[in-house]
Amino acid sequence: MTHRLKRVSELMRRELCTILERDFRFEGVLVTVHEVSVTPDLKQCFVYLGAIGKDYQKEDVLAKLQKSRGVIQRDLYKRVTLRNSPQLVFRMDNSIERGVRVLNIIENLPPMADPAPEAEGEGPDTPPQP
């Protein structure tokens, strides 16, 4: 990704966070914008969201945002002026939840067993006796 696309993506992420925080209420769900990825031709913009809540609430959040996509795009493009106004595509990102699950698995692993004691007089640095 070029430097310009990274800057555009970051600017759009910040503005989207502001719009979602100001204009939308999600009861019982914490919604965050993890990443915004813009295609090189600036025709599409993928918005990866994280939501902490129950599974059906996450689906409701995604449906609400897809339904309000036109309003969100209009507000966003008033704040971010581009030659092409990319179409927003909202997607759920479960990477945080997967990471927490992996960390829990690692913490619950049994302790490592001690290595077998070596025979006396024979260590890794001493040559074997004939």
Image (tube, rainbow, N blue to C red):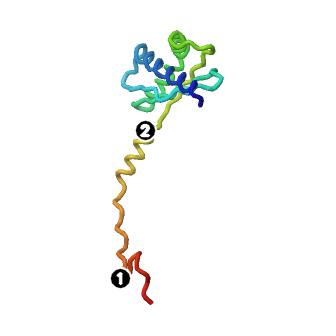
Residue identifier under label 1: 121
How far is the residue under mark 1 from the one under mark 2?
Answer: 51 Å
Task: Give x and y (percent) for residue 105.
Answer: 39, 50
Q: How crowded is mark 2: few (under 14 residues within 10 Å), some or many (20 or more)?
A: few
Q: What residue type is labelled 2?
A: Glu
Above or below 98: residue 129: below
Q: Residues within 10 Å of mark 1 (few under 14, many from 20)?
A: few
Rendered-image quadrant of the N terminus? top right
Task: Give x and y (percent) for residue 69.
Answer: 54, 16
Q: What residue type is labelled 1?
A: Gly
**Left or right position of 120 against 36:** left
User: Which residue is farthest bottom?
Assistant: 130
User: Which residue is farthest right?
Assistant: 41
Q: Residue at x 36, y 25 (%)?
A: 28
Q: Which mark is residue 97?
A: 2
User: Which residue is farthest top?
Assistant: 78
